[in-house]
Image (tube, coloured by chain):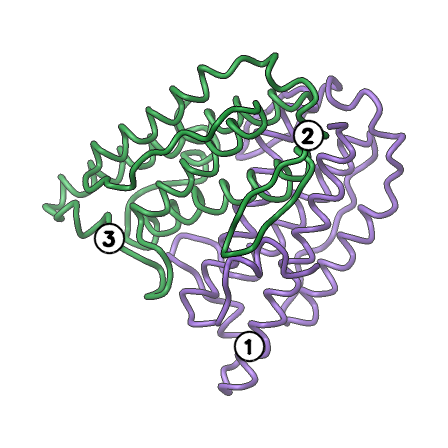
Chain colours: A purple, B green
Amino acid sequence: MNTYDASVPVFIHFLKSLSAILRKAEAHCAARKIDPAVMLGLRLSPDMFPLTRQVQIASDAAKGAGARLAGMPVPGFPDEEKTFDELQERIHKTTGFLDTLDAKLFAGAETRPISLKAGGRDLNFSGGAYLETWAKPNFFFHVTTAYAILRHAGVELGKSDFLAGGQ
Amino acid sequence: MNTYDASVPVFIHFLKSLSAILRKAEAHCAARKIDPAVMLGLRLSPDMFPLTRQVQIASDAAKGAGARLAGMPVPGFPDEEKTFDELQERIHKTTGFLDTLDAKLFAGAETRPISLKAGGRDLNFSGGAYLETWAKPNFFFHVTTAYAILRHAGVELGKSDFLAGGQ
């Protein structure tokens, strides 16, 4: 599969799932008079990130991969979201950015050197290894963790929401 | 990236992470005199699968994708694991099966029709769509959920265990 098809539409598909999952979480809060800020601050462990940050990092993984593989600067989105609406807007901005990327920019991306800093370390990948062993695993890790936080909080979700909730 | 490189080595990489994560969980149980069967039975929600089943489904996603994309029958592994050792053996059998798959068998796999039943429905994909929107997302979903169960239970893990724990 070419690098564009293995990245941009996959990220968009699962960002739409994440958006749909968050809509169900917001409806759950409304139905049960739960303060949305409480739900957005939930964590599975005190030293894990809360729901809001999981969504922000999923966005970062998707836009970072799209931009780097296209050879473009990674757009910076300030991590200031505090409401479900603002997280929906973050997801919408992320899919919007991915939508602007021309598939032609991904020619040669599989072998293009990709360098980034993570956890204070310099990481160097080929584009293909970056996408398959770093960007997509990270992306799915944070989308799944967002889902897991909400399942643990009692929101009625099933795996179909993850796999195809936005379709 | 060719379909072999986008599937078999990715599954093996993250199955090794899962194996390393489970070794840390087992050591955590030993150090704190926790019955391993309790840890293996933990769930994030009463209607989610326990840790053992998360590992089994991750194995199923990996061997199913490897086999289907190679045009081979999917090997059946009975879901009988009850201990950390047996889960390690399940993971080892899965990576062992994936290791036997010749990359040449994946020629044309991206466009090969893939049909499977899930949740009582017949699903039909091209090989590429099956891998990118079904098999790998499912795989990462269950590996991440196993990690999340253990983090929630207090096992000392970090994302580097997920990304590169088996390297």
- Reading the image, the residue beneath label 1 is A36
* x then y, percent, for residue B122: 58, 51
Q: Residues within 10 Å of mark 3 (few under 14, many from 20)?
A: some
For numbered disc 1, what is the local secondary structure? Answer: helix
Q: Residues within 10 Å of mark 2 (few under 14, many from 20)?
A: some
**Left of A59 or right of it: where is A69?**
right
Q: Which quadrant holds the N terminus of chain A?
A: top right
Between the C-alphas of marks 1 and 3, the distance is 31 Å
**Left of A111 or right of it: where is B161?**
left
Amino acid type at circle 1 is: Pro
- Reading the image, the residue beneath label 3 is B41
Q: Which quadrant holds the C terminus of chain A?
A: bottom right
Comparing marks 1 and 2, which lies closer to the viewer? 2
Residues tagged 2 and 3 counted as in contact (Cβ below 8 A): no
**Who's the residue at 42% across and 38% down the image?**
B60
Above or below, comparing residue B4 to residue B82 in the picture: above
For numbered disc 2, what is the local secondary structure? Answer: loop
**Who's the residue at 57% across and 61% down the image?**
A161
- Reading the image, the residue beneath label 2 is B112
Camera-side residue of A65 and B52: B52
Residue A154 sits in quarter: bottom left
Q: Choose the circle earlier in sequence order: 2 or 3.
A: 3
Residue A109 sits in quarter: top right
Say which chain tag 1 marks.
A
* x then y, percent, for residue A81: 66, 64
Camera-side residue of B64 and A13: B64
Comparing marks 2 and 3, which lies closer to the viewer? 2
Residue B152 sits in quarter: bottom left
For numbered disc 3, what is the local secondary structure? Answer: loop
Say which chain tag 3 marks.
B
**Who's the residue at 40% across and 35% down the image?**
B59
